[in-house]
């Protein structure tokens, strides 16, 4: 509230509203309480996330094993494909002369080459399907191949 302002040089000035009731009006809007209101939890419905379909990629290649290089001992095991947990399909095929000594070792580790732990893939065999294999693939020609051999592979991955 305000009171009249009086001074010797001025007339009595009335400043403000002597009947101001703002304080009581504002207090009437508020409710006094000692505890905070109880928390209300409501579940929020969420729409299921839509995952876009991932696009696959094709990996293919060829490895040529020359009989002259194998006989000379200059051929080393080759990693055809690295490990890939997203690989969905893998097919291997060998082309070359079909004799009893012509084959290519296939294994998942370099250390398994030329041992009983490696598989032998021959030119006369059908396509070799490794669809469920996600590890590395290594290839190495048999030591006594008589003709050049080609190894082809096709793989799909995410």
Image (tube, rainbow, N blue to C red):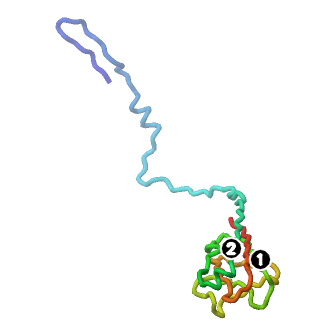
Image location of residue 56, percent across then percent down: 72, 62
Establish if 112 lies above or below 149.
below
| In-front residue for pair 34/104 | 104
Image location of residue 20, percent across then percent down: 38, 24
Residue at coordinates 74% horizontally, 82% vertically from top-left? 147
**What is the crowding at mark 1: few (fewer than 14 residues within 10 Å), some, or many (at least 20)?**
some
Image location of residue 46, percent across then percent down: 66, 56
Question: Disc 2 on helix, strand or loop?
Answer: strand
Residue 63 is labelled as 2
The nearer-to-camera label among 1 and 2 is 2
Looking at the rendering, in which quadrant would you find the N terminus?
A: top left
| In-front residue for pair 90/51 | 90
Establish if 54 lies above or below 96.
above
**What is the crowding at mark 2: few (fewer than 14 residues within 10 Å), some, or many (at least 20)?**
some
How many dots with numbers?
A: 2
Residue at coordinates 61% horizontally, 84% vertically from top-left? 72
What's the CA distance linking mark 1 and mark 2?
11 Å
Residue 76 is labelled as none
| In-front residue for pair 5/81 | 81
Left or right side of 24 for 75: right
Establish if 158 lies above or below 3.
below
Mark toward the start of the polypeptide (1 vs 2): 2
| In-front residue for pair 74/2 | 74
Question: Disc 1 on helix, strand or loop?
Answer: strand
Image location of residue 105, percent across then percent down: 68, 85
Establish if 45 lies above or below 139.
above
Looking at the rendering, in which quadrant would you find the C terminus?
A: bottom right
Left or right side of 85 for 14: left
Residue at coordinates 30% horizontally, 13% vertically from top-left? 14
| Residue highlighted by disc 1 | 93
Left or right side of 107 for 98: right
């Amino acid at each position: 509230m305000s009171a009249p302002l009086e001074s010797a040089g001025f007339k009595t000035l009335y400043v403000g509203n002597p009947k101001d009731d703002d304080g009581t009006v504002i207090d009437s809007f508020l409710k006094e309480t000692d505890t905070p209101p109880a928390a209300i939890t409501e579940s929020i419905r969420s729409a299921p996330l839509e995952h876009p379909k991932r696009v696959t990629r094709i990996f293919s290649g060829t490895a040529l094993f020359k009989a002259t290089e194998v006989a000379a001992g200059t051929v080393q095991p080759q990693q055809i494909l690295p490990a890939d947990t997203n690989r969905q399909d893998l097919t291997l095929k060998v082309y070359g002369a079909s004799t009893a000594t012509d084959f290519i070792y296939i294994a998942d580790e370099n250390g398994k080459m030329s041992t009983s732990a490696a598989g032998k893939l021959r030119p006369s065999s059908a396509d070799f399907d490794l669809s469920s294999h996600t590890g590395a693939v290594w290839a190495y020609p048999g030591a006594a191949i008589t003709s050049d051999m080609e190894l082809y592979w096709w793989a799909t991955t995410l």
